Image: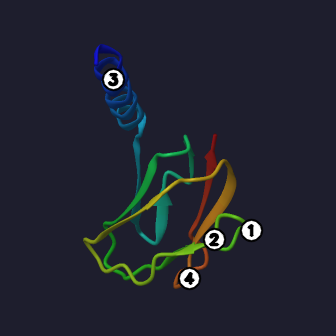
Amino acid sequence: MMGKVALGGAVALAAMVGTAWAAEIVVEQQNKAFTPTSASAQVGDTLTFTNGDLYTHNMFSGTLGHEFNLGGQSPGEKKSIKLTKAGTFEVECQIHPRMHLTVTVK
């Protein structure tokens, strides 16, 4: 019985440690631009877009293996994606094509 309790505790601790290391990378949208324009993250982190602009945005990535489309994002709205794969990808706004963000996930 002692071995089962110890193993259960180790699994619970591993789950807590895995969660504790995940970070949230916040990307602001203001004046039709991303701030910052590049971000570094770890697999498991969350990339959150905060629309502080007066305009609707639509973040997407067409980078092979990292494709996503968050759809319309109204002023004041936040939208997030979980980073599940290592690599570098580009994020753009489908509405404002001059908005670019480079994300590197390790």
Q: How far across and down, in percent of the image, does residue 102 sit?
A: 63, 55
3D distance between C-alphas at marks 1 and 2: 6 Å
Q: Residue furthest front?
A: 1
Residue 64 is labelled as 1
State the residue position of label 3.
Answer: 4
The secondary structure type at the circle numbered 2 is loop
State the residue position of label 2.
Answer: 67
Mark 1 vs mark 3: give the one in front: 3
* Amino acid found under the numbered disc labelled 1: Leu
Mark 2 vs mark 3: give the one in front: 3
Give the mark nearest the N terminus, 4 or 2.
2
- CB within 8 Å, label 1 to label 3: no
Give the mark nearest the N terminus, 2 or 3.
3
- CB within 8 Å, label 1 to label 2: yes
* Amino acid found under the numbered disc labelled 2: Glu
3D distance between C-alphas at marks 3 and 4: 52 Å
Mark 4 vs mark 2: give the one in front: 2
> Residue 5's image quarter?
top left
69 up-or-down from 34: above or below: below
